[in-house]
Image: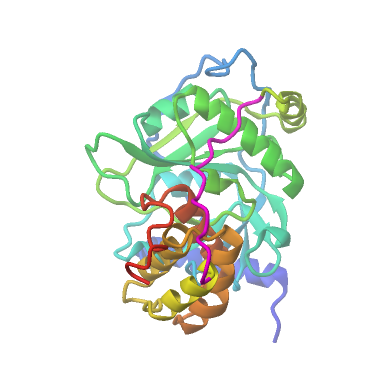
Amino acid sequence: MKLSQADEIAMVRATMRRAHAAAAASAAAPAWLQNWPTQASDGRHPGDDQELPTTATSQNEQRIISWWPNHRMTQLTRLVPTSLEELEHSLNRPPTLDADKHDLPCWSAGACHGSRSDANVRSVACLGFDADNTTVSLADAVARLPIRALGHTTYSHERNAATHRWRILVWPSRTLAPEEFRPLWDLLAHVFGGLGVRVDPSCKNVSRLWYVATQRPGFQFATNRCDSLDVPAALDLARKLQTPGAPVRKTQPAAPVRPSGLDAVERASRYLAKMPASIAGSGGDQALWNAAQKMVRGFSLSESDALHLLRAEFNPRCLPAWDDAWIVRKVRQASEKSGLAWGYLLDGRSS
């Protein structure tokens, strides 16, 4: 018997309550309020002469997010209502989950009607920003934002480390339409830049997936009491800032020219056939990352060529097969973040 949406929502809520109470590995999402460090803000737009428009909003307004058992099961989307108050409570006191990061439940601020993809998002509850290896602490970043925000340290954050890893969620004055997400994300990324933080550009897709917060050594939560970002006024500001002189994202060094003779794509395909496939529980994520780096950096393939090979020749061998959005993410990270030299496999040393 097919469940109605109301029945599915009730079922998911009941499952999350049980999981949170038991601190079991199936614990999921919104459920986050006690003893958070309240921070004051002077209301100025950091690092810029412009002020961000704000407006008051209710903490109990219900918005829809997506939830999945883990990142390999994003075709099984559950739409879950949540409010700012519920989100705050769940993030402040998350469960302690003894599980590998890639086995944790996941969620997205985008309400995906169907499997997870940007095309299936119908609304967006909030805007999220990740920072890795930044010298700006979570508490400092949240305190200096002049808009309603809350955040937590992420899975890979380490206690007493010289740099910080965190995620900050900005709660806008209302639910966003998908086409409103990107202009506001770019605007706020500029604001974070004024704080001295370069946020992860891969967060700008509207169906961005995040692992749920978990209690780990050094875990921190922070929030502020500012008013919410005024969506209509902020969109107007974003349009005004989209000028030829606006800041642009730094690009990677150009990839070397492919050599003549045997085509690089064919050589990459032969190399990929010899690489081990991803097997769940046996370093599967690392295997995908290795494959993506070899294609993008080792053979200097374009992202589209690398994606074609990974989808057609690598993913069918994986157990289970990867969600397409995860492959896209790994290819993008290989292009933007890998430390390997461009084209280092093109001389034939390892091909």
Residue 81 appears in the rendering: yes
Residue at point 67%, 44% (across, down): 61
The residue sitting at 74% across, 42% down in the picture is 180
Kindly identify the residue that appears in the image at 36 percent across and 49 percent down.
339
Q: Main secondary structure of the magenta part?
A: loop
Q: Position of residue 233 (x, y in %)?
A: 75, 26
Q: Residue placed farthest to the front in the image?
A: 261
Q: Tell me which segment is drawn in magenta.
A: 246-262
Please state which of residues 66 and 84 is positioned toward the viewer in this rendering: 66
Q: Where's the N terminus, which quadrant?
A: bottom right
State which quarter of the image contains the C terminus.
bottom left
Residue 267: image x %, image y %? 47, 73
On the question of residue 225 being in view, the answer is: no
Is residue 206 depicted above or below 304 in this figure? Answer: above
Q: In the shown orientation, is residue 75 left or right of residue 341?
A: right
Name the residue at the left extreme. Answer: 160
**Which residue is at the front of the view, 88 or 275?**
275
Residue at 70 percent across and 37 percent down: it is 183
- Residue 254 sits inside the magenta stretch: yes
Percent coordinates x, y for residue 296 in the rendering: 48, 59
Instruction: Please tell me in which quadrant of the rendered image residue 12 appears.
Output: bottom right
Up-down: is 347 above or below 124? below
Q: Quadrant of residue 100?
A: bottom left
- The answer to whether residue 342 is magenta is no
